[in-house]
Amino acid sequence: MIPAPRQSSTKISLPALGLILACALLAFILGVVTWRNLDREERLMENFLRKEGLTLIRAFEAGARTTMMMGPQADTLETLVRETAQEETVAYILIVDENGNVTAAGSRPDTMQSMPVGQVLSDGAPVTRLTRDEPGNSVFEVAKEFNPVAGDASDRRMRGRWQQWCTMGGMGNGPACRQAIFVGLYTREFEAARQEDIKQSLILGAVLLLFGAGGFYFLFLAQESRVARHTLENMELYTRNVIESMPAGLITLDEQGRITSLNEKAREIFGHPGEAFEGKPLENLAGEGRCDIAPMIREGREFLDKPMVCRTPGGDSIPVAVSASRLRDREGAPLGRVLIFRDMREIRAMEEALERSRRLAALGRMAAGIAHEIRNPLGTLRGFAQFFLRRNEEDAAAREYADLMVGEVDRLNRTVSALLQFARPREPEFSSVEMRELLQRTARLLEDEMTAHQIAFLLDLPAVPIVFRADPDLLTQVLINLLQNALAASETKGEIRLGGAAGEEGVRLWVQDAGKGMDAEERERMFDPFFTTRREGTGLGLVVVQQIIEQHRGRVEVVSAPGRGTRIEVILPHGEDHGKT
């Protein structure tokens, strides 16, 4: 099953977290800077308007002093107040006595409430506040005591005139000489500047928001692209692993018949590294009599499991079943071809083993019937031969013939016994077997025969005890048969080794000789019944060996070459129940 693509992770990635933090930091900085700018502008506005208001107040005080020096002309100051209040930046100007009576006024709305006169006169220092007039405009009010002669303590004459002026009603309302002046100044320009700053801050905030949204969008696209790329890489890796793990060889071709890819099994079948042939025509890989499939591909034929024999560069023949089909894209346009090579060696070996088993079963049934028919006459013939041997003790020729008859009858009896073992094998009786005891007991049974043939008989015993489950009598028979074959293949003063060990695959027993060895044909037929290269052999010894090992669920491996001796290994699987059926 093809793995489904992984879902996007719900966790915030590091780039997204970094972008969030950066946007939050920029928003915080923008807010702080905006707030500080507005606060600074408000302070600057207050300072500027306070100075401007005080400047106007000082101008009115100077005008009042000028009026006092020229004589009692109250309307001069009032005129100055009215004219100054006509300025666009001036909301109103009021001069109020300590009793709350207005002595001079300029453009003051009725709804505007000034600060209490008592508070202004009691504070001594200038007092400021921010109010709003009727149209909703902000007004910055500056108030202080109106005293044209303040700070002029050395001029008693001016103070006297100020008292006289107040008493004479120069300020318009009788003897109250303590006056407060209120100057209201519009803040439109400053408010407009503040609104512009706020507008700029909002624009910057919108830009920041757009930048953040764009950043998140591009991060989302990048994340989706990364997930898609990762999914494609996983799919490519998964597909490559599936193709490389296929038990069949796979070759893809383009429309021009050039090799675009081939998997490990195909490289094994053709005995070449795949990289050397990618981009090359198929003839370079399968031509030169190795596996001539190129003509069929050029004809555009599609076929399924066509039997064929391919040869590796080393000359080995590999039976294969070849299938060819077209590759097409989503629109159905041809892209090339795909070839599948199934290695049929194991299937052929299984078929041969099955055929051999079938023949052996039929041969076994026939051998069992023949053996029973032959064994009884053999017993009678042996008895007659021994009878004549006793009757003709003085006749040397008759005695020799009688001995020969007994020996031949015994040989025929051994052949018949082997036939019976082959036809009706005994079921194994499993018990615990210690490897060193098995090897030593087998060696004792044949050491005299080895000595008689002047063969060096060597034992390769395991260093530690190895106990496994098997039928000790049947294994002894296996080792004896193998040793007798090794003895027959060895020359005088040769060497035979018998040994065993425990490995990863299981328990291993081996017999190795330095005799004449076997060629490929002999190795292929060595387990066939009645096949033998010895004049006195029956051709059943190795058949019985294979039969017993198969009953133990093991296998036999053979390594041999002409003139280089033979090594036969018996491998029995691990586990106490390996031989149970």
Image (spheres, helix red, strand yellow):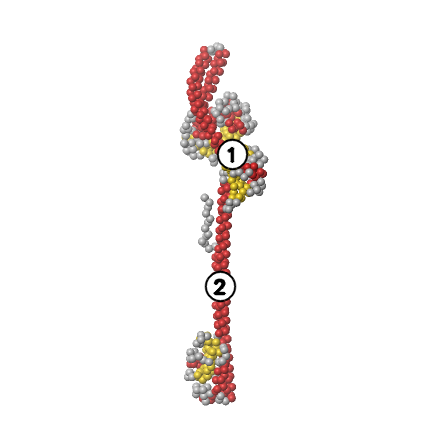
Front residue of 320/212: it is 320
Q: Secondary structure at mark 1?
A: strand
What residue is shown with label 1?
307
Res. 83 visible in picture: yes
Judge the density around disc 1: few (<14), some (14-19), many (≥20) Cα neighbours within 10 Å.
some
Q: The C terminus appears in which quarter of the rendering?
A: top left
Which residue is more in the foreground, 458 or 82? 82
Report the front residue among 516 and 105: 105
Q: x, y percentage for residue 116?
A: 42, 80
Work out whether residue 497 can be spotted.
no
Q: Which mark is residue 10?
A: none
The picture quadrant where one finds residue 172 is bottom left
Residue that appears at 50% across and 44% down: 239
What secondary structure is found at the residue carrying circle 2?
helix
Residue 49 in picture, x, y percent from top left: 49, 76
Q: Earlier in the sequence, mark 1 or mark 2?
A: 2
Mark 1 against mark 2, which lies toward the viewer? 1
The amino acid marked with disc number 1 is Pro
Reply above or below: 112 against 373: below
Left or right: 490 with respect to 550?
A: right
Q: Which mark is residue 206?
A: 2
